Amino acid sequence: MRQRSTSALLPSYLVTPKELWEALDTNASRETTSTRLIPLCASWFLPNDPKGRTGQQVFQEKRIPSARFFDLDAVKDHESPYPHMLPTAEAFAEAMKDLGIRKDDEIVVYDTQELGIFSAPRVGWTLKVFGHPKVHILNNFRVWVEQGYPTETGDLHTITEDKSNYPIPDFNPDMVVKFAEVKQIAREYGKEGAEKIQVLDARSKGRWAGTEPEPRPGLPSGHIPGSFSVPVTDLLDPVNKTLLPGNDLKKVFESKGIDPAQPIISSCGTGVTAAVIDAALHEADFGKVQDRRLYDGSWTEWAQRASEADGLIKKETI
């Protein structure tokens, strides 16, 4: 079930290429003082990408006209040893200023044509954590291109206009889970009287089971005790890599034994594709909004701070 947004331009958090194109056309005809609709490219590739691609590279090669580029490897906590921890509110505001984005802009985040839905939900989730009021995810850029909607090319410096005056936002801690809480959940898993908090892991089934290596050298694979394997691929159309319809997503979650009445934490490798699960839960209207959170450090933090010896890393044969 699609949940309607309060935005006047776009109907829901997840939007189709047709909806975006029509909204851009409508927005272009409005007065300059009206709320702007801005496509925001969130292209990102894993560090072991076989073709050595980068988000900036594919953004320069092909993008939605007038899109800005959000660099996941730059807009983060640079003091953290983990790859994609949320930035400070001050750093987030500075990134928005550099992109020329204003607080009242309506943002549509999108992914690469190559991967389909992948990293855009992380950027959309980040915007929501810092209270940006109008945020959407395009489902998806591959379909945008296939359906013949316009694209452009060019260097990054030709895209962004003057800096904005984006204010330092409030941070919503209720959307985020830290290591200490997940550790407590893992230690109490299976004990009588323990709160039934469900951890959903977006990594591949093999990485979750400990039978496939992690993309980051030296990091063991395996899973948090009691966690559910919910690979991103199970949530996407196998051909065009769009997020599945809400009813289909609901069936996926139900088939894995996930209870919508219990709190849910999304996790993955570095906190990026965990947000795909979060977006899928939203699209499926599965679980209470206030009971859905994301483990920011995800497996990269967990595997460096927990161990198999202390029972906090599990492996199994599949």
Image (cartoon, grey):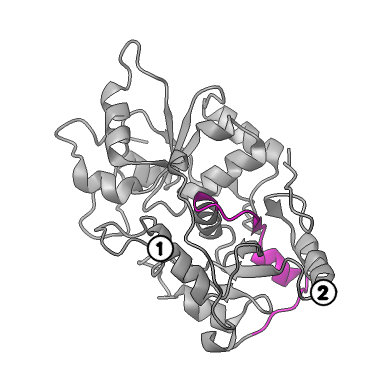
Q: Is residue 85 left or right of residue 147?
A: left
Q: Nearer the viewer, residue 163 or 137?
A: 163
Residue shown at 78% from the left, 74% from the top: 148
- The residue where tag 2 is placed is 31
Q: Is residue 317 above or below residue 34?
A: above
Task: Return the mark for residue 90.
Answer: 1
Q: Position of residue 139 (x, y in %)?
A: 67, 57
Find the magenta span and give its range.
128-152
| Residue 188 position by quadrant | top left
Q: CA distance from mark 1 to mark 2?
A: 31 Å
Q: Position of residue 288 (x, y in %)?
A: 58, 30
> Dividing the image into 4 quarters, which one contains the N terminus?
top right
Q: Nearer the viewer, residue 89 or 28?
A: 89
Question: What's the residue type where badge 1 is placed?
Answer: Glu
Which residue appears farthest toward the left when viewing the image?
Answer: 309
Res. 316 in view: no
Residue shown at 27% from the left, 48% from the top: 301
